[in-house]
């Protein structure tokens, strides 16, 4: 009797404790079945990872690179940017002409461009899409893309029923008239905000297009699994020819470590934002390339101790060892920074001296700034948001500045609190004295970094968080905008950059952006592009997977 | 019984209102402007932010915003997510199935392992096996979930290649009528196992303590005296009477999984509610945070109610909860 009871307990407990490994073991069996079923399919499926669900798939609302990864494959505008050469190339418009006074652009639409819903694109679609971007109720943060068009502001304010500078003399022609000559305009039209969308889809009050966008790009969204997967399929009628890839799976995996394991085990074909200390087995698969972006620590020029004290700002620049930061502490894709305009952008100044690490110079400038050895300097707040390597960067800067006697207090907060402390309003400065920030250029033009970040018209949330005011700088940037000669423009931008960097130093210049992306060796046709990690043109990819 | 159930369910209303108010106040007090975040992560024209603020009513005085919010809740309307511009109800529904499947699978595994090991420890009180179970339980309860998750991924996915690393699986069964898609079970194993290993610890300890507690009572001694084996006493008498405290812990654990599986969801890229909640807080997406918190609160209250209803079934001596009211 006793023996039987014990046996029963043992059986029950054995079953209980065996349940977990049994489940796991059962999982192995199923994997084989599934693999077996998948094996015969030779579909070209490319899988990559995003660290978060894209905030939006609406091209009018998109401002971030996660959304870009889908939007730029689904949508097209009149023109596009060649990812390798950064030249403006035809898209829905097969050709265009610019009038001698640089005020009128005439676009000729191709006749084989169709939306994913099968409807052919006509000039009225361009007009409606542009109006949509400008309309108040769209709340587009990219309204400024079309503001150079004559009458755009009046239309946006509801003072005009149509955009005066926008016309379609026939269904295949769009004529755009600008308020004044504006050199970067064509480049700006390559951005997602200027995409052409079908009215019948984007007037939906239920906004189904947020999950099922309809464009005319090489891929169409066929599946949206919240916080998990966005699947795109090749669009057979893409005007540029059907892509070689049948399908693209965008997997949302927040954790960097698990994403790397997913890549190593074959669950992903590409992975970006990888750590610097990669495992040996995947190191040969890394592709490094520069990006159009610049990283810095901003000084609040309306708050002490930086207000009216350029010597102090220069001292801090000399005190921080940028080479150590990017080559030793955080080796990876970033390049030690010297200025504002990143390499690859017309106007980039290879001879700009910047502020190479020099403690003696830093001390001398600190004394000239009125704080010999840091005496009389209260701790300065350095703000950064909780993300990536921000803390390590801030700690290194703190350590470097401590060496010359400048005390920093680190303030790590979440993104919302960070923006509140940094942006301020056009009238009042934010709370932060110093803050870590970066800027990816929307298009490869020096205006795309100098104007939003440092022009005095953009003080506050519009981008000039530093509250930098220099009429001579504003004048150079404004003058460059109206010039048509690229060399002359680049010259003015170089002059403006030297003025801001070497004379005024509104930032602590840290780095130029770069990217490290992993690609499996069987992924062919990869075109690295400075436009961003997620701008590698997927329609040029194909897979040469060994048969397994 | 129906009256009792109704009373308990009505009691949910003030609890939900209190939770809603607390969350609203907390988010209101947090630094950061929702309108600025809705306008996008880049530098932005202040005019666009002003328009957004006006459209969402974020420039109204706090009492007006609160009153509008309460009125909306009382109508059963959870509102529209700031960040996703879609109904909060739809977003919660999308995340509920992954959360529920993970919670149920983890709890089932934890129940089997926790109660089994707890009973085993009680049966071998003071001996090696008992100590081993207690140490394992302590280890399970004190292991950080993300670390355990990574360890399991490295073992079963990276090295052994038995199971997938992350995800929900894209080919799971779609339930007829409701149309929700279940996870692929191969994808469910590792996240469920991770959570189960952590949850099983406290369950094993409670089971052991509870079994030992009732093991010395008179009726069990009498059963032994009648010739029932020690194991038989444990399984047929002691375990059943020891279950009420276990059920209570189980109920709380299950409710906590609705929002508390965040670390597991992050490690395994599981599209659950916890992750949605964390993201909504970061984006100051007030309607979505409120929706998640209300759902969590409801889960806790309903789990407590379910436990109260279950207890008399497990141990008839506890009596009808309705009669106690």
Image: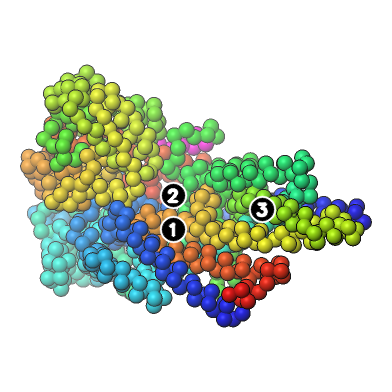
Please state the horizontal and vertical placement of residue A535, each as a whole percent of the image. 37, 49
Label 2, label 1: how far apart the Cα atoms are:
16 Å
Label 2, label 3: how far apart the Cα atoms are:
39 Å
Q: Chain of mark 3?
A: B
Label 3 close to label 1 by CB (< 8 Å): no
Q: Quadrant of residue A111?
A: bottom left
Q: Quadrant of residue A215?
A: bottom left
Which residue reaches farthest top?
Answer: A360
Q: Chain of mark 2?
A: A
Where disc 2 sits, the SS reads: loop
Check chain identity for marks 3 and 1: say if they share one.
Answer: yes
Residue linked to disc 1: B277
Please state the horizontal and vertical placement of residue B205, each as a whole percent of the image. 67, 50
Q: Nearer the viewer, residue B117 or B319?
A: B319
Residue A133 counted in the magenta span: no
Where disc 1 sits, the SS reads: helix
Label 2 close to label 3 by CB (< 8 Å): no
Label 3, label 1: how far apart the Cα atoms are:
30 Å
Label 2 close to label 1 by CB (< 8 Å): no
Residue linked to disc 2: A51
Residue linked to disc 3: B206
Q: Nearer the viewer, mark 3 or mark 1?
A: 3
Q: Residues within 10 Å of mark 3 (few under 14, many from 20)?
A: many
User: Residue at the location (39% across, 58% down)?
Assistant: B280
Q: Is residue B245 left or right of residue A440?
A: right
Please state the horizontal and vertical placement of residue A429, each as a whole percent of the image. 17, 46
Residue A286 counted in the magenta span: yes
Q: Residues within 10 Å of mark 2 (few under 14, many from 20)?
A: some
Is residue A474 placed above or below B80 in the rendered structure? above
Magenta stretch in the rendered image: A282-288
Check chain identity for marks 2 and 3: say if they share one.
Answer: no
């Amino acid at each position: 009797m006793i023996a039987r009871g014990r046996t029963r307990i043992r059986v029950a407990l054995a079953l209980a404790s065996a349940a977990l490994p049994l489940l796991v073991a059962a999982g192995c069996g199923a994997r084989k079945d599934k693999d077996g079923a998948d094996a015969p399919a030779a579909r070209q499926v490319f899988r990559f990872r995003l660290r978060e669900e894209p905030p939006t798939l609406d091209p009018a609302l998109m401002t971030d690179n996660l959304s870009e990864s889908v939007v730029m494959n689904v949508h097209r505008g009149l023109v596009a940017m060649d990812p390798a050469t950064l030249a403006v190339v035809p898209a829905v418009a097969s050709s265009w002409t610019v009038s001698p006074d640089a005020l009128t652009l005439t676009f000729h639409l191709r006749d084989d461009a169709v939306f994913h819903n099968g409807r052919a694109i006509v000039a009225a679609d361009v007009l409606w899409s542009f109006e949509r971007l400008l309309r108040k109720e769209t709340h587009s943060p990219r309204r400024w893309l079309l503001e150079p068009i004559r009458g755009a502001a009046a239309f946006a304010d509801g003072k005009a029923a149509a955009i005066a500078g926008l016309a379609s003399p026939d269904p295949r022609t769009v004529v755009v008239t600008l308020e004044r000559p504006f050199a970067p305009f064509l480049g700006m039209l390559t951005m997602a905000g200027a995409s052409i969308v079908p009215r019948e889809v984007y007037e939906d009050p239920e906004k189904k297009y947020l999950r099922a966008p309809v464009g005319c790009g090489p891929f169409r969204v066929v599946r949206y699994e919240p916080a998990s997967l966005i699947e795109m399929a090749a669009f057979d009628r893409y005007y540029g020819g059907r892509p070689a890839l049948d399908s693209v799976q965008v997997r949302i995996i927040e954790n960097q470590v698990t994403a790397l394991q997913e890549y190593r085990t074959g669950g992903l074909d590409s992975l970006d934002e990888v750590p610097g200390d990669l495992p040996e087995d995947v190191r040969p698969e890394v592709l490094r390339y520069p990006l159009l972006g610049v990283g810095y620590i901003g000084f609040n020029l309306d708050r002490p101790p930086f207000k009216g004290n350029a010597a102090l700002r220069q001292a801090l620049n000399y005190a921080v060892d940028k080479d150590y930061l990017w080559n030793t502490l955080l080796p990876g894709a970033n390049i030690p920074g010297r200025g504002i305009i990143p390499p690859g952008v017309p106007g980039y100044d290879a001879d700009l001296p910047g502020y190479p690490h020099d403690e003696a110079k830093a001390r001398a400038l600190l004394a000239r700034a009125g704080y010999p050895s840091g005496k009389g300097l209260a701790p300065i707040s350095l703000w950064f948001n909780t993300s990536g390597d921000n803390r390590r960067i801030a700690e290194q800067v703190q350590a470097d500045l401590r060496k010359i006697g400048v005390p920093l207090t680190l303030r790590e907060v979440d993104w919302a609190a960070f923006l509140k402390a940094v942006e301020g309003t056009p009238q009042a400065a934010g709370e932060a004295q110093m803050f870590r920030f970066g800027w990816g250029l929307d298009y490869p033009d020096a205006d795309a970094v100098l104007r939003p970040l440092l022009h005095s018209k953009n003080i506050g949330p519009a981008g000039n968080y530093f509250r930098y005011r220099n009429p001579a700088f504003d004048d150079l940037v404004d003058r460059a905008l109206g010039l048509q000669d690229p060399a002359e423009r680049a010259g003015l931008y170089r002059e403006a950059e030297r003025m801001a960097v070497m004379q005024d130093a509104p930032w602590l210049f840290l780095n130029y952006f770069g990217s490290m992306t992993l690609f499996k060796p069987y992924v062919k046709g990869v075109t690295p592009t400075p436009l961003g990690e997620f701008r590698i043109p997927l329609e040029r990819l194909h897979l040469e997977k060994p048969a397994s | 019984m129906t009256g009792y159930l109704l009373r308990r369910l009505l009691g949910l209303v003030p609890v939900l209102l209190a939770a809603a108010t607390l969350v609203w106040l907390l988010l209101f007090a947090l630094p950061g402007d929702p309108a600025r975040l809705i306008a996008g992560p880049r530098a932005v024209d202040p005019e666009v932010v002003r328009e957004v603020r006006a459209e969402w009513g974020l420039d109204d005085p706090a009492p007006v915003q609160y009153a509008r919010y309460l009125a909306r809740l009382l109508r059963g309307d959870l509102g529209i997510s700031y960040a996703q511009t879609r109904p909060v109800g739809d977003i919660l529904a999308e995340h509920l199935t992954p959360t529920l499947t993970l919670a149920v699978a983890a709890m089932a595994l934890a129940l089997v392992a926790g109660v089994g090991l707890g009973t085993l420890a009680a049966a071998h009180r003071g001996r090696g096996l008992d100590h081993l179970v207690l140490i394992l339980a302590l280890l399970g309860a004190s292991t950080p979930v993300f670390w355990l998750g990574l360890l399991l991924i490295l073992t079963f996915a990276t090295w052994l290649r038995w199971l997938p690393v992350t995800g929900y699986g894209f080919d799971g069964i779609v339930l007829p009528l409701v149309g929700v898609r279940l996870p692929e079970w191969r994808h469910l194993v590792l996240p469920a196992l991770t959570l189960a290993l952590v949850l099983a610890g406290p369950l094993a300890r409670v089971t052991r303590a509870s079994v030992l507690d009732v093991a010395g009572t008179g009726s069990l001694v009498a059963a032994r005296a009648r010739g029932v084996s020690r194991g038989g006493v444990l399984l047929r008498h002691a375990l059943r009477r020891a279950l009420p405290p276990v059920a209570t812990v189980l109920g709380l654990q299950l409710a906590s999984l609705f929002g508390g599986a965040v670390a597991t969801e992050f490690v395994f890229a599981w599209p659950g509610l916890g992750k949605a909640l964390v993201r909504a807080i970061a984006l100051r997406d007030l309607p979505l945070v409120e929706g998640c918190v209300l759902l969590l609160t409801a889960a806790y209250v309903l789990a407590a109610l379910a436990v109260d209803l279950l207890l008399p079934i497990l141990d008839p001596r506890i009596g009808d909860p309705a009669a106690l009211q």
